[in-house]
Image (cartoon, rainbow, N blue to C red):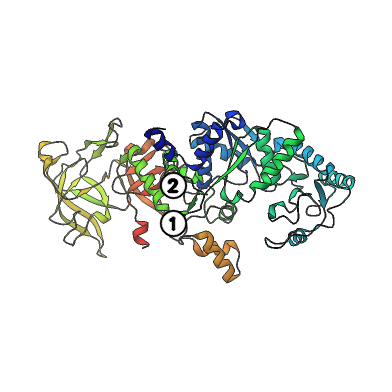
């Protein structure tokens, strides 16, 4: 093996190394087939994006197939709304599945398999309560005890199983358990539940089924039925792998098929500080109106990041940067934002916007005169072109860009000091006007006609450059400044601490952790007219302020912009 091959081998993550080993050994005929198996019980979050990138990325890298399979085995929580949203998110991230499947496609096959297990004495109907079953399973250091129904006659279990599916048994009264080993050191083998009664209509199969398979029973068999070769899961499924393999062995032997089988590999979840990613908790936020829906830009959902202005490339780059390991870690949200800044720097159109306006009057500029100044769309992209921005006697500047009495190293506008108006002229501040309460309402300056950007006299250097928009050639806009939703670094763990100390529920704990400054809405902002036809998902940089995009609710008569990320990381500085 040469040096290049050695380097390439070292650059492979451990999943890729395992896949290459399987291909070399001829497992599954050298095929590579993966699947992304979300449950349609909520919107995907950025943690799912890591699994999506791996599942689809592995298939693409090794000329394989990646299918989309919805794990729809619990109709009480699932909905077609989530199915549609999941598909939209995957496509937005830049991936396309080969086939679309549902666990419900296999309900009949799984039912038939369960019937065969009962007939073989490998499964039985248990009438204990969930509390009784949990108690008789024992502990990791104490073996379990047999259920009093473990040796129930096969015909009786078959009859009761049919009654479960016919709707004759109430929810929670009976379950079907696999008969494995109640003394096994592996708790997963202590007669796991494989079917339970749910009487809620299914979003695809309606009222056909009342008995539904458990995830551990449906997942491996679904992989096997589809021909999956590499079943990629997060680390919490490590203890489930032996049971996964056992059920695959049972169904494989029953069907007497070739020795092709899926192999489960586990990788670490994506965990971010100042982020809560449990779909159950995200649903609480939505239902209790603590956020404005699943796509509220403060949420960690993929649709929320999209609405906030993240590009799919930035998310993929971030996931590639943090990589895949066999141990969990808490990643810094600031790293994600850093990747987003680098990405948007190369694609965002530079525009002028004033969020906290104060009027600047250029007293020696001709009244009624308007000039069109050229503004480069993106200095990082020579092919991005340019646009023009109107310049006139009265312009809006940021309130923070003027101080009547300024400190020594203040390089913005103050009486007697020169600054450049970006893409326009150098001006010198001559004073300001105040109202009766002493508040500054106008600033005055004089311009140098020979200092226009691009002219020979424009080479004169000044230390400050300000952005601006013409008062009579701009558009009013609403700007939403989003920040982190939580004011604690690890909201998941902190929530449990609060619940234990105060005896409160998750909702009350969340209310104590929410960052009150996670959203500021500014309604009196001005942007240049170039943005009149800007569309949602356009990537913009408000010069000297940050990266923004057009919100989906924006209209030509009511422009709305969302801050994607600031130009620099201010959060860590504030919270140190």
User: Residue at coordinates 42% horizontally, 38% vertically from top-left?
Assistant: 313
Relative image position of residue 397 (x, y in whole percent): 26, 50
| Marks 1 and 2, how far apart at CA | 26 Å
Residue that badge 1 annotates: 518
Check the image and report above or below for 304 versus 130. Answer: above
- Among the 4 quarters of the image, the one containing residue 549: top left
Residue that badge 2 annotates: 322
Few, some or many residues within 10 Å of mark 1 (<14, 14–19, 20+)? some
Instruction: Name the image quarter holding the N terminus.
Output: top left
User: Residue at coordinates 63% horizontally, 39% vertically from top-left?
Assistant: 70
Relative image position of residue 180 (x, y in whole percent): 76, 50
Check the image and report above or below for 153 versus 22. Answer: below
Upstream in the sequence, badge 1 or badge 2? 2
Relative image position of residue 229 (x, y in whole percent): 60, 35
Label 1 SS: loop
In the picture, the disc for residue 430 is none
Along the line of sight, which residue is nearer the eye, 292 or 318?
A: 318
């Amino acid at each position: 093996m040469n040096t290049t091959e050695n380097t390439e081998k070292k650059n492979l993550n451990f999943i890729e190394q395992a896949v290459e080993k399987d291909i070399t050994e001829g497992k599954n005929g050298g095929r590579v087939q993966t699947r992304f198996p979300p449950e349609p019980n909520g919107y995907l979050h950025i943690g799912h994006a890591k699994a999506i990138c791996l599942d689809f990325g592995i298939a693409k890298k090794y000329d394989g197939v990646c299918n989309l399979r919805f794990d729809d085995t619990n109709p009480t929580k699932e909905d077609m709304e989530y199915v549609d949203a999941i598909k939209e998110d995957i496509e937005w991230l830049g991936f396309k599945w080969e086939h679309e499947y549902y666990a419900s496609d296999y309900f009949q096959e799984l039912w038939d398999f369960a019937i065969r297990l009962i007939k073989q004495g490998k499964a039985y109907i248990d009438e204990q309560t969930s509390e009784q079953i949990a108690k008789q399973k024992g502990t990791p250091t104490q073996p379990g005890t047999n259920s009093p129904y473990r040796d129930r006659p096969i015909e009786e279990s078959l009859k009761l199983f049919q009654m479960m599916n016919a709707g004759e048994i109430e929810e929670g009264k009976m379950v079907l358990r696999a008969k494995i080993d109640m003394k096994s050191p592996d708790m997963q083998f202590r007669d796991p539940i494989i079917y339970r009664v749910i009487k809620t209509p299914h979003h695809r199969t309606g009222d056909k089924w009342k008995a539904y398979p458990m995830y551990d029973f449906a997942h491996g068999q679904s992989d096997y039925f589809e021909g999956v070769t590499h079943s990629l899961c997060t680390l919490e499924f490590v203890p489930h792998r032996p049971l996964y393999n056992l059920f695959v062995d049972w169904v494989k032997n029953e069907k007497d098929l070739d020795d092709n089988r899926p192999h489960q590999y586990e990788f670490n979840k994506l965990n971010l500080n100042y982020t809560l990613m449990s779909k159950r908790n995200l649903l609480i936020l939505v239902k209790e109106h603590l956020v404005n829906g699943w796509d509220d830009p403060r949420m960690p959902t993929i649709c929320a990041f999209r609405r906030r202005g993240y590009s799919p490339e930035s998310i993929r780059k971030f996931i590639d940067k943090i990589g895949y390991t066999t141990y969990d870690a808490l990643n810094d949200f600031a790293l994600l934002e850093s990747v987003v800044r680098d990405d948007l720097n190369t694609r965002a159109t530079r525009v002028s916007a004033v969020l906290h306006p104060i009027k600047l009057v250029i007293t020696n500029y001709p009244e009624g005169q308007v000039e069109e100044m050229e503004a480069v769309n993106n200095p990082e992209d020579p092919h991005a072109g340019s646009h023009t921005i109107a310049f006139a006697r009265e312009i809006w500047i940021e309130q923070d860009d003027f101080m009547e009495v300024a400190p020594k190293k203040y390089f913005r506008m103050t009486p007697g000091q020169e600054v450049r108006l970006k893409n326009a002229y150098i001006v010198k501040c001559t004073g300001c006007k105040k109202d009766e309460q002493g508040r500054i309402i106008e600033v005055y300056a004089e311009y140098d006609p020979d200092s226009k950007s691009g002219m020979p006299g424009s080479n004169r250097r000044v230390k400050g450059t300000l952005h601006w928009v013409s008062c009579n050639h701009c558009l009013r806009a609403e700007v939403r400044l989003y920040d982190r939703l939580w004011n604690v670094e690890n909201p998941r763990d902190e929530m449990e601490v609060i619940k234990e100390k105060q005896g409160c529920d998750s909702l009350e704990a969340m209310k104590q952790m929410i960052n009150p400054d996670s959203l500021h809405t500014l309604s009196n902002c001005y942007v240049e007219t170039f943005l009149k036809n800007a569309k949602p998902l356009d990537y913009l940089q408000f010069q000297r302020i940050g990266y923004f995009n057009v919100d989906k609710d924006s209209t030509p008569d009511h422009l709305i912009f969302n801050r994607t990320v600031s130009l620099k990381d201010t959060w860590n500085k504030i919270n140190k």
